[in-house]
Amino acid sequence: MNRDLELLKDMGDALPAIDLHHAGSVNEALTKLDQEMTRLSLSHVNACRVIYGIGEGVMRKAVLQELGRHPLVRGVVEESSGGSAVVGL
C-alpha cells in the first residue's frame, strides 16, 4: 500500500486534500480530519492528501498518531516537502 501511496504523491491538486493547518486547535483539526476522511470514504475515494503544515511539529505529531490508529486508514506516506502526507483509505 505505501508503495502505491508513493506514486500518488505526484498527483498534486488531483488528489483530494484535507487542509488542517489553519485549524484553531489540535482537537479541532482531529475532529475535521475524522469527518473529512469519513466523507471521502463514503464517496469511495481511496486516497487523499492531509495537510498539517510546518511549524513546531505539534499538529504533525497529533495528526500522524491519529492516522496511525484510525480504522479507515490503510497507509500513510509523509511527503518530503514537509507539512503533509498522502493517506490511503
Image (cartoon, rainbow, N blue to C red):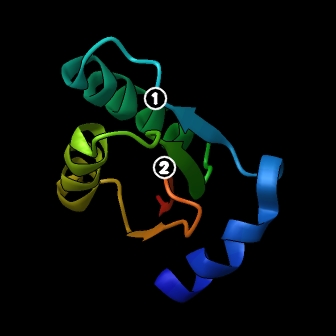
* Residue named by callout 1: 21
- Residue located at (27% from left, 46% from top): 57
**Relative to 5, does residue 16 appear above or below in the rendering?**
above
Which SS class for mark 1? loop
- Residue located at (27% from left, 54% from top): 64
Where residue 5 is drawn, which disc sits there?
none
Q: Position of residue 67 (x, y in %)?
A: 29, 53
- Residue located at (59% from left, 62% from top): 81
Please tell me which residue lies in front, 38 or 83: 83
Please tell me which residue lies in front, 55 or 26: 55
Q: Is residue 61 visible?
A: yes
Residue 8: quarter of image: bottom right
Please give left or right for residue 60 compared with residue 84 in the image: left
Which SS class for mark 2? loop
Label 2 packing within 10 angstroms: few (<14), some (14-19), many (20+): some
**Relative to 56, does residue 19 appear above or below in the rendering?**
above
Residue 73: quarter of image: bottom left
Which three-letter amino acid code belongs to the residue tagged 1? His
Is the Cβ of the residue at disc 2 closer than 8 Å to that at disc 1?
yes
Q: Is residue 1 visible?
A: no
- Residue located at (59% from left, 51% from top): 48
Residue 24: quarter of image: top left
Q: Residue placed farthest to the bottom in the image?
A: 3
Q: Position of residue 30 (x, y in %)?
A: 27, 30
* Residue named by callout 2: 83
**How far, Cα to Cα, is label 2 from label 1?**
8 Å
Please give left or right for residue 61 compared with residue 23 in the image: left
Which three-letter amino acid code belongs to the residue tagged 2? Gly
Please tell me which residue lies in front, 48 or 52: 52
Q: Position of residue 85 (x, y in %)?
A: 49, 58
- For the image, the number of numbered tags is 2
